[in-house]
Image (tube, grey):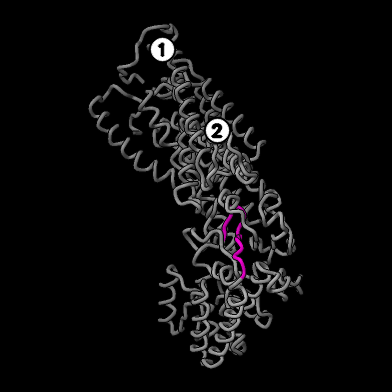
Amino acid sequence: MNAPHPDRHPDRQANPQSDRPATPARRLVLVTLGLTGLLAVAVAIAVSFGAAAVPLWQRLFLGSAWSEAQQAILLALRLPRVLTAAALGGLLGVAGVAFQALLRNPLADPYVLGVSGGASLGGVVALIVGVGGLGVPLAAFIGALVSLVAIERIATSGGRLTVLTLLLTGAIFNAFSAALIYFLQSVASREELSAIVFYLMGRVPSSGALTLVGLWAAGVAITLALFASARDFNALTTGEEGASQLGVDVERLKRRTFVLGSLATALAVSSAGLIGFVGLVVPHLLRRLLGPDHRLLLPAAFLGGASFLVLADLAARTLAAPTELPVGVVTALLGGPFFLLLLRRRGAGFAGSAGSRNSGGSGG
Amino acid sequence: MAPAAAETLVELGVAGRIVAVGDFVDWPPILAGLPKIGGHDAPNPERLVELDVALLFTAASAAGRGEHARLEELGIRVSALDTSTFGGTLAAITEIGRQVGREPEARALRERIAGRLEAVRQRAAMAPRRRVLVAVGHDPIFVAGPGSHLDELVTLAGGENIARDALSPYPMVALETILERAPEVIVDSADNRLGQPRGWTAGFWTKWPFLPAVAQGRVAFVDPWQLLVPGPRLAEMAELMGRLVHPELFGAPRPEDFAGAPAADESR
């Protein structure tokens, strides 16, 4: 919580209800504006490049014309895909923060609580049954919702949702789904097999306008809903008892967080498959940069996750053009080493300032 | 055994010696009803022994190599074939002929195919190259790339594969690239299900009316059976590709050129 921040002035509008110096609202505005700017830059770069060459800026500033193909490439393919990537990255980033707060474990990511398993399974079943187009994301989303309800039921005992049971249930659910997917793969034809493999690798689609609006609306709504509990998440880092003593309805918070984070994950996985590392690396990086306050972290994770996935997808689209790489490969290649680096530096900092930070705790 | 090997064996006149086939073999019809004993590169060893199989033709694969060695220990001769290219397909015919003692027949078959391929090449040699896209998957879009027999077929038949510079034989390619490279002919063999629309129809590609192939009505939906299993039918495939890419030289495609295996049609 109280990580020392040289640039943070415990002054301005000190919040009397809080037990610590409040983060000024100004900081939230600055961070949000800054990251919105970053996202805008990322989007601008991402729509400028692709497998095909489209003179985007020449047209905007010099009035050169586009062919019909170039217009379709930019407006029907590239722009929707970039905006989809942004929405999905945002959803994953926010889900990552939510689950890390809920489980009080910095290693949690959006896929840890089992919903992704249900989503993948639903999508794979749809692929095998052969419902193309929107059938696959729809089936995946239904799979995710079913597993969400099932996991919630199983992990609740005596009206309480225990974090440990939730974690175990999620892990078992994922393993179980993976086994069922392997089974389906083993009886699938070669065409189905390759479709399944590429579906599971993760790929950002060029969504239609309606899907795009839906994803963005859901992303913003989920972020705001979680943001409403940001103060409670801050309290939760002291442990469930501590949070209760601070007046937080912990049971309600846990359930809400699980459901909201799972919905975000479900939307992301059902539209794009399993894109790893976004929900893990982005929250960590932001926590390092901004400190552990969830009031800053949640909006920042949406915007940061969005920027990260937009750029990762840009790499997936262009690095081996005209061959497309699965974006999950790119996020892992970027995210993996980066995460390790972060861990090392954090480890050093952790040793140096032992005791001053309690968000990592035994879980870190 | 792989479909291509099955077709070759029947072509070489040794159909009667086949005791079992792979899961995906449904052609030629003479093989219908034989036990099916496994997928791509991994037939069921117990069934192989049970059926007293002496010789197994299977697809060459790094993953299957260990299994193949074990089968050899069990006294089953394993011939792993790579029929993914022209060269591989012709070599496989020679190899199959050698294994079953039909070398002269195999040589004759090979020469017949090579002769017809050469005839296609010569006929298309002077024609202007048309930009061709061969799609083998829609979601995501997979196309024929370098190192696939489809790429060779396109080149032979007077086309220029627009995915020539991709990284693998069946790359996942950006739709952006396809729109930018504006194929003049699209051969779509992505959907292997029965009852799909076949023939000259824009179908999946209707969304992009400015593509020359769509604008000129040169989008062909062809059953994968026609083009995707290189084997003894390689020459027919080349001639069909000629009719699709340069109908003015090779004649218009016939209705049956778009359809699936005749036997599959009857059972429909």
The quarter of the picture where the N terminus of chain B appears is: bottom right
Residue A62's mark?
2
Choose between B129 and B239: the one closer to the eye.
Answer: B129
Nearer mark to the viewer, of 1 and 2: 2
Image: B28 above or below A67: below
Q: Is residue B129 left or right of residue B66?
A: right
Q: Position of residue A197 (x, y in %)?
A: 53, 55
Residue at image x 50%, y 71%?
A: B41
Residue A22's mark?
1
Please state which amino acid type lies under the numbered disc 2. Answer: Leu
Q: Position of residue B16 (x, y in %)?
A: 62, 89
- Secondary structure type for disc 2: helix
Upstream in sequence: badge 1 or badge 2: 1
Choose between B65 and A38: the one closer to the eye.
Answer: A38
User: Would you say residue A163 is visible in this rendering?
Assistant: yes
Q: Is residue A323 left or right of residue B193?
A: left
The quarter of the picture where the C terminus of chain B appears is: bottom right
Number of labels in the image equals: 2
**Residue B130 colored magenta?**
yes
* Magenta segment: B127-143
Q: Is residue B176 left or right of residue B250?
A: left
Residue at image x 35%, y 39%?
A: A338
Q: CA distance from mark 1 to mark 2?
A: 49 Å
Please state which amino acid type lies under the numbered disc 1. Answer: Ala
